Amino acid sequence: MIAEIGHLLAFLAFASALSQVWFGFTGGGETVKRAAVGTFALTVAAFLLLIVGFVTLDFSMELVAKHSHSAKPLLYRISGAWGNHEGSMLMWCVIMAGYGGVAALTMRADALKERALGVQGALTAASMAYLLFASSPFARLDPAPLDGSGLNPLLQDPALAAHPPFLYLGYVGFSFVFSLAAAGLMLGVIDRDWAKRTRPWALAAWSALTVGIAIGSIWAYYELGWGGWWFWDPVENASFMPWLVGAALVHSLIVTHKRGGMAAWTVFLAVLAFLLSLLGAFLVRSGVLTSVHAFAVDPQRGMLLLSGLAVAGGVAFGLYAWRAPLLKSGEPFDPVSREGALIFNNLCLAVAAGSVMFGTLLPLAAQIWGLTISVGEPWFEFALGPMLGALFLILPMAQGSTWARTEPAPILKRLIVAAVLAVGAGVLAFVLYRQSPWLAPGLAVGVWLVAGVVTDVARRVGPGGISRLFKLSSAVWGMTIAHLGLGVFVIGAVGEHAGRFEQTFVAEPGDEFTFRGMQFRFEGAKAAEGPNYTADQATIEWIRDGGVVTLRPERRLYPASGTPTTEVAIRKTIAGDVYVALGDPIRDRPGAWSMRVSHHPMIDWVFGGALLIAVGGFVSLFSLRRRATREASETETGDRAQQGSPGAAAETPLGQSAGQAGGQPATREVST
Amino acid sequence: MRARSQRLWLIATAGVLLAGATALALTALQDSVAYFYAPSELVAKDAHKEGTRVRVGGLVEAGSIERREGAEVRFKITDGANAVPVTFSQLLPDLFEEGQGVVAEGRLDPSGLLVAERVLARHDENYMPKEVYDALRKAAPANGESPAGYGAASGAGG
């Protein structure tokens, strides 16, 4: 029954999404709100029923039989619901409808909201149609098997239970940004108010995407057994492209919100972020590219996704080409100004996203000429490193700059200490570790970021001292945390990359070996048993001055699917992770095994930095929400008048009177 | 005046960045891209120059896995017609087995031995790297039968 009710609910959700489109485009007001909330509730109900099917092990459902097993722990029975193509598509629909539902309940009622909910309804309906007609999670299996074939053991991991929901909150979150952009273009209201209302959605999606990517990276680090945290795999790149464009978007939205500028570009990014998310879905699920991430490979589904991408892209860019030329420009500014810096930020991020796309799709293009090539880590590092490095050099200066026009001298003067620290760190790295080309410049840039952000906080606090630290607005805190996180991440990434060292050993029980001055003893491997797997568990003692640390890496075999996996042993130290992976037993030498020991300095900086970026994003989101509630009492017209009527400024030919008279002194920040 | 100079700045910066990115991308392409060959292509075309980066894909030849000193492992990658010897000194992937699909990436030494820096095997029991599938199909078109297991795959959310 569960499957049939779930299927029915999914159909009702599809119908509700269609009604949402109708009311959204015919000015349904309250009705479109109700439809959006209804779509959300129905998709959630369908999804819950699917989870019930997975938890109760209803093997008469094809999806459960294929991806679950009676011996599986509860957590993975639940996460099994989205650890496969069909279930994850349903989660995609739930989250898409969820953004619509939350927007319906929280946004101010007006034409933009109605129309955006209508567009969101269309996207949801299209996703639901794809779900129902091309990949239904509620299909029955007759006769039902006695037991399921088990979830891929690599996915039976807490990090990977959380990875898809966050990733989709990000990917799919851009769908509502897309809807707002399309609605704004149709209504011709891409202005400061539009940007102000779009910002929270872009920030929410982008921050969630950051968390999702970070979790996936952490998982890859300890679960795949290779000890790397980023492989430039097509599927990773598929998430990195919308992340880069999303990062550009959250910055350009600030310019459009505060100064009315860059409106056409901002709305272009808003459309592009979601299209790149769709491209990612296509790359992951169609199997056109070779990737370590295997998903259901099905050309028909690939074609459907590609058609969806083409339709969404065609409509959106058509709309854009028609409407964007009518958009007003914002207030004029000097190249050396906060606007100028944010434009530079956007150019760098957009070009970086373009490079990632080139490297990801090149193997596909080469196939047309009959060549099979692979583009790997060295290419991406070389192509992206300098571009992002230039961006990071500008960042601390941008933080100290003011709108419209900035006097560079005082900013540069303040940053002298940061520059000295950065150059010092770079020179030190160059002298001590000459073998790695990225370390010295990378470390210098990372230190520059951290020291530059701290300098900026110190300026904002002023002579008031620490007590004023807590009086800084949450918007400033969000930016500060995110940018500090970026600095920490850069330092960690180049440090880990340059300092990573690994060596493979073959040892018999009782053998000792030395790895980078560390003494290890292999005690042997014995059979062990888990809830749904059997394992060979090795015992390796790391002999230190203070005593012995025991490491127990495993090789597991999951009989349900017949898949072996590597379970690494990691010991965290101040100097980084010591990481041991067990290899294979050696034929002809009983008791002997191969194993790989590696050292990953600063690995926690990599993940910690990435998570700080996300925290910064969420804090900014929180500050926008708070400001929105504070401003709710003020009338909208009052708000606009207060800002010096950007509309009027833009309508006069640029720079005649508005530029000089308006803006500058009023909006310029007080810098000491 | 103002608007025009603003636009000029923008176009100039964008142009410099784009040109820089293109230059970087193309320079990097010269030596960091690996071409993929099936064993027969590598042998027949004599397509390799010593020291160029290549990827070779096929099946691990039955009975060819040989452990050497330390962690070194030697094996042969075959597509049914020809085989390429490979040496690898790191841990082999979980699903590395005789008769299974594999991709090795590395450089060729003068004797034609592939010194692999990376070895990729199937991701799980259902999945075979697409390159391997294509290589096998190219090598044995008469066979008609598709290599086992390519198609349905359970997979990682991502």
Image (cartoon, rainbow, N blue to C red):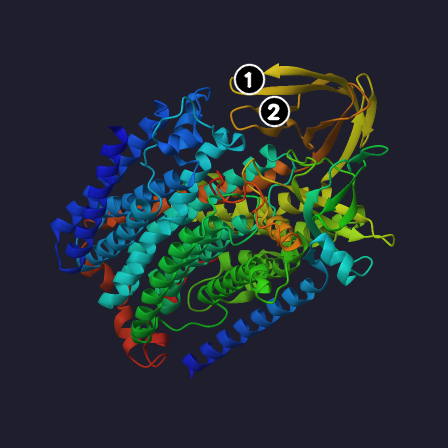
Q: In the displayed orientation, state which residue is furthest to the front.
A: B142
Q: Residue at 31% across / 55% down in the picture?
A: A198
Q: Nearer the viewer, residue A648 or A464?
A: A648
Label 2: how many Cα within 10 Å (few below 14, some 14–19, many 20+):
many
User: CB atoms at circles 1 and 2 under 8 Å apart?
Assistant: yes
Which label is found at residue A556? 2
Residue type at tag 1: Gly
Q: Nearer the viewer, residue B3 or A247?
A: A247
Instruction: Say if residue A67 shows up in the picture.
Output: yes
Name the chain under label 1.
A
Label 1: how many Cα within 10 Å (few below 14, some 14–19, many 20+):
few
Reading the chain from its start, which is encountered first: label 1 or label 2? 1
According to the picture, the residue beneath numbered tag 1 turns out to be A530
Up-down: is B135 above or below A471?
Answer: below
Q: Quadrant of residue A655?
A: bottom left
Name the chain under label 2.
A
Location of the N terminus of chain B by quadrant is bottom left
